[in-house]
Amino acid sequence: QVQLVESGGGSVQAGGSLRLSCTASGSIFSINDMYWYRQAPGKQRELVARISSGGSTNYADSVKGRFTVFRDSAKNTVSLQMNSLKPEDTAVYYCRGEVVIGTGIYLYWGQGTQVTVSS
């Protein structure tokens, strides 16, 4: 059984910072790409950031220059440092991992963590 558990969400004023973390546990051989998504009320879930096993990253245009994704592969952890937060960053943030188990690759999601940015 594999679980991804996020932490670090909360409430912050515009301009503030938060760091989200996501730790995978279970029968994991390795994890390929890891992602952060978010979903605001009434909107579709959108990709925020991606980091490969080799450390290459991609970001949504809306967060470039403000958010940084990084990972500790030895600890099966991915984090998202969010700076200069804006009210439009308010959403539930989810991590996702491409987990290698045996000879297969499986997608797992975390349960989500709420981020609320007030103006």
Image (cartoon, grey):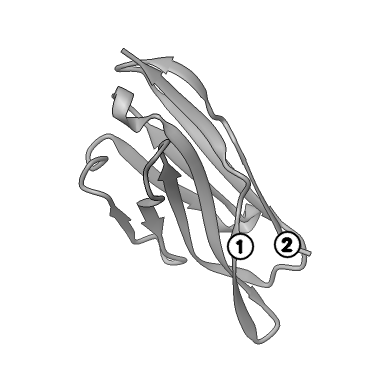
Q: Is residue 85 visible?
A: no
Which quarter of the image is occupied by the C terminus?
Answer: top left
Where is mark 1, residue-wise?
Answer: 108
| Residue at position x 40%, y 58% in the image | 51
Residue 46: image location, x then y, percent? 36, 51
**Mark 2 residue type:** Val
**Mark 1 residue type:** Tyr
Q: Looking at the picture, tell me which residue is in the foreground, 87 or 80.
A: 87
| Residue at position x 70%, y 82% in the image | 102
Residue 92: image location, x then y, percent? 49, 37
- Judge whether 40 appears above or below 28 on screen: above
Where is mark 2, residue-wise?
Answer: 2
- Judge whether 116 appears above or below 50 on screen: above
Q: Give the number of callouts.
A: 2
- Judge whether 114 appears above or below 11 on screen: below
Sequence-wise first label, 2 or 1: 2
